């Protein structure tokens, strides 16, 4: 208790605007990682057959890493789609695939992914399937048929099933985060247009990388706020770099509120994890329902040392993970 109290004083006195509600919000370090700990926009899943952990990342053909445990040793297994996506966008390299999102259903692994031109609405969401997730075994099905719209950017897909219906969350900047119903895992439903889940009215509306999951009576919407950046030459103002926000809803299809009761359509979103100690700009997160540990938050972060060295770009992005604890039906990041 004494240590926690001192830590809180130290945190309040430091540059971080953390410790907002109570001192219990001081953030613990990520769990350990050995082997290849690089990641960018990770999506993690345990294979049904053997429990092996797969970590997929943005990059050439969607990078695949595997490990017998969350801690490693993680091994680079190669590109999921070495030939790239069948989606052809003008001026976009179709092997540069972003923001994978994985789930398993009835013997098949589904991977949603993005092909996009950075900072524009020239984007498409595609889907590929495999029965093993081994590199090169993926069948690409191309676009899911999400119509373009000035309101949103078709990136950062995330799948969920709610009351027997399948949905995809998506979006980045513009009018931020949306949800669309799927007619099948391969295709959006044309019956209902996409609806907005969260919006930050400030500046250029920096919300992306949504991840929706269910726990107890609520659905929790996590998203990354702030500037993702390449973190090479210039850095965002302190507090404006990537961090992880959360909102919750009882339906999972709307009415998301933060801890303070602010609607997430009206700039709400409580911080779950942000820069602390050696961890700079955590984001691009997801939640794995681990067979042994329960809900585990995983994310990318930028090691402070890489930032202080002037930045190494995407090469420095590092995998972090923490078990989630629960208090008053809100998750918090637990020490491992
Ligand atoms: C909204 O944007 C402002 C300005 O970037 C930022 O300070 C704030 O934390 C954001 N809030 C959310 C919930 O994203």
Image (spheres, rainbow, N blue to C red):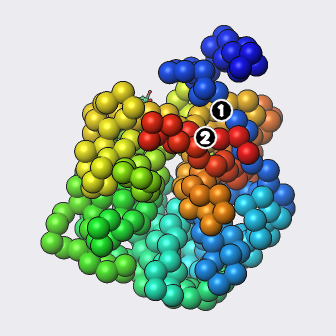
Residue under pointer 2: 333
Q: Mark 1: is the Cβ under 8 angstroms from ligand 1?
A: no
Where is residue 9, by image quadrant? top right
Label 2 CB less than 8 angstroms from ligand 1: no
Q: Quadrant of the N terminus?
A: top right
Residue 215 percent coordinates (x, y): 44, 54
Question: Where is residue 310 shown, x and y percent of the image?
Answer: 76, 35
Q: N-terminal of the two: label 2 or label 1?
A: 1
Q: Is residue 38 above or below residue 245?
A: below
Q: Is residue 72 above or below residue 318?
A: below
Residue identifier under label 1: 27
The picture quadrant where one finds residue 89 is bottom left
Q: Is 306 placed left or right of 266 in the picture?
A: right
Asked whether, in this view, residue 158 is left or right of residue 242, the answer is: left
Report ligand 1 position as a quadrant.
Answer: top left
Q: Secondary structure at mark 2?
A: strand
* Viewer-nearest residue: 150 or 165: 165
Q: Are marks 2 and 1 in contact (CB under 8 Å)?
A: yes
- Judge the density around disc 2: few (<14), some (14-19), many (≥20) Cα neighbours within 10 Å: many
**Viewer-closest of 153 and 255:** 255
At numbered mark 1, what does the secondary structure look like: helix, strand or loop? loop
Say few, some or many: other residues with alpha carbon within 10 Å of mark 1 (under 14 / 14 to 19 / 20 or more): many
Residue 126 percent location from the top left of the image: 42, 74
Would residue 201 be visible to someone looking at this image?
Answer: no
Image-based side of 129 in relation to 267, left or right? right
264 vs 135, nearest the viewer: 264
46 lies above or below 227? below
Q: Which residue is nearer to you in this view: 188 or 311?
A: 188
27 left or right of 247? right
Which quarter of the image is occupied by the C terminus? top right
How far is disc 2 from disc 1 in space, using C-alphas?
A: 7 Å
Identity of the residue drawn at 32% across and 65% down: 162
């Amino acid at each position: 208790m004494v240590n926690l109290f001192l830590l809180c004083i130290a945190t309040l006195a430091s540059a971080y605007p953390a410790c907002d509600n109570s001192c219990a919000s001081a953030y613990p370090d990520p769990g350990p990682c050995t082997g290849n700990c690089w990641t960018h926009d990770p999506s993690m899943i345990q294979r049904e057959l053997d429990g092996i952990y797969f970590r997929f990342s943005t990059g050439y053909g969607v990078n695949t890493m595997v490990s017998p445990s969350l801690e490693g040793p993680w091994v680079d297994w190669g590109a999921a789609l070495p030939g790239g996506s069948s989606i052809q966008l003008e001026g976009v390299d179709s092997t540069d695939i972003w923001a994978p999102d994985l789930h398993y259903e009835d013997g098949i692994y589904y991977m949603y992914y993005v092909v996009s031109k950075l900072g524009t609405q020239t984007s498409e969401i595609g889907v590929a399937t495999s029965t093993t997730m081994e590199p090169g075994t993926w069948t690409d099905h191309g676009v899911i048929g999400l119509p373009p719209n000035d309101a949103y950017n078709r990136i950062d897909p995330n799948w969920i099933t709610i009351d027997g219906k399948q949905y995809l969350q998506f979006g980045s900047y513009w009018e931020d985060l949306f949800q669309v119903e799927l007619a099948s895992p391969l295709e959006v439903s044309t019956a209902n247009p996409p609806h907005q889940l969260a919006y930050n009215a400030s500046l250029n509306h920096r919300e992306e990388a949504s991840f929706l999951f269910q726990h107890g009576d609520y659905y929790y919407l996590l998203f990354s706020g702030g500037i993702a950046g390449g973190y090479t030459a210039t850095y965002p103002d302190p507090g404006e770099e990537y961090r992880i926000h959360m909102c919750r809803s009882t339906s999972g299809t709307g009415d998301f509120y933060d801890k303070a009761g602010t609607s997430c359509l009206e700039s709400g979103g409580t911080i779950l994890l942000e820069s602390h100690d050696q961890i700079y700009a955590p984001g691009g997160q997801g939640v794995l329902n681990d067979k042994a540990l329960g809900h585990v938050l995983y994310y990318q972060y930028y090691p402070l040392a890489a930032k202080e060295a002037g930045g190494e770009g995407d090469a420095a992005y590092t995998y972090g993970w923490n078990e989630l604890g629960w208090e008053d039906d809100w998750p918090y990041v637990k020490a491992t």
